[in-house]
Structures are given as structure tokens and as C-alpha cells.
Amino acid sequence: MMKSNDLPHAPVWTAAAIDADPLFFVQAEGSAAATAKLLLVPKTVPQLVKATHDVAYEAGRDFTWEPGSREILLTPKSQIPFHTQAQVLLPPGSPDSIAATRDGKKHLLFGEKHFFHDRQVSAAYEPAERWSGPVPAADALGLSLTMERLAAREPLKIVVLGDSISTGANASGVEGALPGQPGYPDLVADGLHQRFGSVVELTNLSVGGTNAGWGVGQMQVAIAEQPDLFIIAFGMNDASGKFSPTKYRKEVARMASVMRTACPDCDVICVATMTANETWHHAAPKVYPAYLDELLTLRGPGLAVADVTSVWSWIVERKSALDLSGNGVNHPNDFGHRLYADVALALLA
């Protein structure tokens, strides 16, 4: 099995080559072929492998690509897995589905563990176009203490408090699948160790199904860990629960304030969540950017914001949400976890 350290972590917004553009192929109703879209236009024919990295696909035999296009089409005899539109939008009560579409008429294809990972493909190519989406920047003011520790190669203890995304849900390594990539908190810790040489200790207190209100109640546990860097990562379940942006800000601000009061030498990163599949009736497309706006008002000395929301939103304007999804609705796949990590690491560039 490939180790996590063997997996490249170059941010897609600076990478000279895209190494793992995720694809989930769907055959639309009335279409002759299943298709998926790349993030950027390639210079030459992309290389496609199964997301598990143990099966390679051949251009011409398994797929076709036209120069200047981002679209990949599967051939009639392709070995690449795909779903028809009817297998993505299912009748209520269907296996491997979850309620419901926004109009309530259909259920969505859904699966935990490595269900989606096993059905996704990874594309590698040199892009012919430049990244034109949001580019995360360093925050020397918000994370000055952490930057000083890392520059001096001092040990760094990270504590993460969040929901199921922060547990690493649906990352291949967490679910026991190839190529064995861990969730984003481990990628952040590993990335800081590789970049600066510091010994980085990670304690992850995240629990699936939780929201920021739950996080407030866990602060004494988090404080007891005496972190140097505290990562707060809620929002997905808050938005699905229709909690107001004001309430969300208040609870995140409370967590940050309590930690900074108890541990004055601890920096805080607040993570702005990915967006859920907009087809899902629990998705809250207008709430995610509102949550981000509220988090940005908290920035200042000792507190930075990892803006996953903006980068994720730009990508899903160019690709299907199922390309990035770990479960079909509200978890990231390996690419998504790597994106989370890259956004957070950019703050400490």
C-alpha cells in the first residue's frame, strides 16, 4: 500500500502538473456516453487511473479526450466504472441512497466507507490553462506564534475539534483502502513536519454528526491538551441544521476566546467548510458563504481563517460535486481532504 508520505501535496493553484484530478463518470439521460470534466484543460492526453491507484486506463480503449476540452468521454467497451443518471437519482427506498433531492421526488446515490472512492478515477496531466480561482494566502498576523515556533524548529502540538469531515471520514487511509491517504488533519501535521522539520503532535477530538454548539461544550477537554495550534472546524452540520450565521459565529468565537484565554500562546485556525452536494435537500448553498463571512470578521492576532469554502465553490462550478465527494453528499474524498490540508498549510507558507 502506498504510504501517505508518498502522496504529493502540491496545491492545485500552484502546481505545474495536476496529479490527482478526481472524476466520477455519469451517463446523462439520452447521452451516448458517460462523461466527467477535468478541473483544467490539459496540454496532452491525461493519464487516468482508478482512485485506488491499482488500475490504469488506456486512452482510445477506455476513454477519449479532445484537445482544448476538459471533458472525458468513456468508450462503449471502457473498463472505467460509471453510473447512469437513473443510478444517481434513485427512487425512494433504493439501496445505497439517501433522502432526498431538493424537490423531494428522488433519493441520492450515497455510500460511506470507500463506496465512492472505489467508483472514482484520478487524472494526471500538465494543464494548458492557469488556475483562475481563489488563491489562499499566508496569515503572518493570525499565526505569528506558530510561525515563530516552526521557524525555530520547536515542537508543535495541534488539537483539532470538528465534525466528521475532521475525523477524516471517507479518506482512503481512514477507510482501509488504497492508496492509504489520511484525512486532512494528519496531512496538515505531516505537511508542517516535512516543511519545517519540527516534531508535530496531533490530537484529534473531532466527532461525526456534531456542530459548533457541541464544540463549545468540549472546550475543557481541548484546553487540557494544551495545544500550540487549535483548529476549529464546524459548519457542515450547522448549515444542514439551519443554524443562523450569527449563532454560528457566536459559538466559534466562544471556542476561540476560551482557548486563547486559557492558553495565551496558542494560535487558532477556524476552518470555513466545504459545500454539500446542492442536489441534497439538507444542503444550504446560501449559508456556507454567509458562515465564511462571519468567520472572516474574527480574524486578527492569534486567529486565522482557512477558507475552504471559496476554493471548493470555485471547483464545483467547473466539476460535478460527485467528483469531489467521499459519500455523495457532505464529505470530501482524498482530493477534498488534500484540498482542506493545502488551504490550511497555505496560511503558514
Image (cartoon, rainbow, N blue to C red):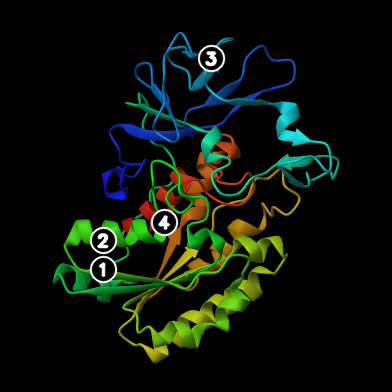
Which residue is rendered at x = 64% and y = 73% of the image?
Answer: 246
The residue positioned farthest toward the left in the image shown: 152
Question: Looking at the image, is mark 3 or mark 4 earlier in the sequence?
Answer: 3
Question: Looking at the image, is mark 2 or mark 3 earlier in the sequence?
Answer: 3
Judge depth for marks 1 and 2 and give the one in front.
1
Q: Which mark is residue 192?
A: 2
Q: Position of residue 227 (x, y in %)?
A: 34, 80
Which residue is rendered at x = 83% and y = 37% of the image?
Answer: 91
Q: Residues within 10 Å of mark 1 (few under 14, many from 20)?
A: many
Q: Is residue 261 above or below residue 25?
A: below
User: Mark 4 touching mark 2, by CB under 8 A?
Assistant: no
Tell me how far mark 2 sits from mark 3, CA to CA: 41 Å
Q: Which residue is mark 3?
A: 78
Question: Looking at the image, is mark 3 or mark 1 earlier in the sequence?
Answer: 3
Q: Is residue 321 visible?
A: yes
Q: Residues within 10 Å of mark 2 (few under 14, many from 20)?
A: some
Q: Position of residue 4 (x, y in %)?
A: 32, 49
Q: Is residue 347 visible?
A: no
Amino acid at circle 2: Leu
Q: Is residue 332 above or below residue 268?
A: above
Image quadrant in which you'd find residue 115: top right
Q: Element at badge 2? A: helix
Q: Which residue is mark 1?
A: 200
Judge depth for marks 3 and 1 and give the one in front.
3
